[in-house]
Amino acid sequence: MSAARDDLAFINRQSFIELQARERAKALFDAETARELVGPFDRVESPWLPLQGVTPQSDDGCVVMKGKISGRPAVVVALEGAFQGGSLGEVSGAKLTAALDLARADSERGILTAAVLLLETGGVRLQEANLGLAAIAEIMAAILALRPYAPVISVVAGTVGCFGGMSLAAGLSSYIVMTREARLGLNGPEVIEQESGIDEFDSSDRALIWAIHGGEQRYATGLADALVEDDTQQVGAAIRGLIAKGVPTVHRSSQVAVYRKRIEALDPTRQFDPKELRAQWGAGDSAPDGISAGGVSAGEEERS
């Protein structure tokens, strides 16, 4: 009966991955509190894409909403992976940076405002290369300015993954939430194969890709703080729990020595199962502020 109930719950769940960026963002807020900033009807779109024969999108693939999550002020920025691979250009980068800057300004005035980044992105938009690189730098600076006041939570859920410069931005976040289907890494499999050859990385080997970049592996090695199913309620519960937890005592990006020790201690002649690594290193070994091995508490998982 238990297995049957689990199957039924899986069938009836609301997939977070299948939602579009605007729907994902809205689903995280308390009812009737979300409002979109610089929405599609404001027609703020890339001036560079038409010059290269690419049809722009009226929100440049970046949705910004402000409202409340569990009664606390929050801003959510969602990148649309279906538009130009969720890539960052001048307009989308400016929108994301401005959202983080507004959250910091409110937090400095005592209105602590968390930021949630829904990242489905390959990084910098190639058609706006230098402008995109500048945007990434501004985003990272904005994250560093906000995170002493309120948590910055990056969520990587879909199979587009989070790569390039935005993976660096995710690494600066207070917390990272992932699904098993998600991928996180600096260079994507196709880029690695193109630059270093198929012997270095076979981009057609799906098992290899998820064993290296996948959500379960990233969670096991302490690079993600919560591993959730593709379920909107579970994603929301994880985010609410991390917002309630507040700013971590030590951010992951400051724990270089911990990760170096882990690498040095690994036996390069054998392959490790991600769960074995998690058990070996112990819950909260390097997770910000001692987050549990489950990422969210058992009570939160039951409520989800």
Image (tube, rainbow, N blue to C red):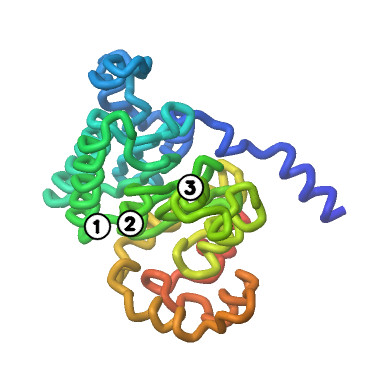
> Residue visible at 31% across and 67% down?
253
- Kindly state the secondary structure of the residue where label 1 is placed: loop
Residue 274 is situated, as x and y percent measured from the top left of the image, at 60, 69
What residue would you read off at disc 3? 194
Closer to the camera, 237 or 98? 98
Asked whether, in this view, residue 199 is left or right of residue 39, the answer is: right
Question: 85 above or below 73?
Answer: above
Asked whether, in this view, residue 86 is left or right of residue 112, the answer is: right
**Where is residue 63, by image quadrant?**
top left
- Kindly state the secondary structure of the residue where label 3 is placed: helix
Closer to the camera, 258 or 84? 84
Question: 206 above or below 23?
Answer: below
Residues under labels 2 and 1: Cα distance? Answer: 7 Å
Label whose residue precedes the other's in the sequence (3 or 1) = 1
> Residue visible at 35% across and 39% down?
76
Mark 2 neighbour class, 10 Å CA radius: few under 14, some 14 to 19, many 20 or more: many
Residue 133 is situated, as x and y percent measured from the top left of the image, at 24, 42
Label whose residue precedes the other's in the sequence (2 or 1) = 1
Question: 24 above or below 141?
Answer: above
- Kindly state the secondary structure of the residue where label 2 is placed: loop
* Amino acid on which disc 3 is placed: Gln
Does residue 299 appear in the picture of this structure?
Answer: no
- Residue 147 is labelled as 1
* Amino acid on which disc 1 is placed: Arg
Q: Does the CB distance between marks 2 and 1 fall below 8 Å?
A: yes
Residues under labels 3 and 2: Cα distance? Answer: 29 Å
Residues under labels 3 and 1: Cα distance? Answer: 36 Å
Q: Nearer the viewer, mark 3 or mark 2?
A: 3
What residue would you read off at disc 2? 173
> Residue visible at 49% across and 86% down?
265
Label whose residue precedes the other's in the sequence (3 or 2) = 2
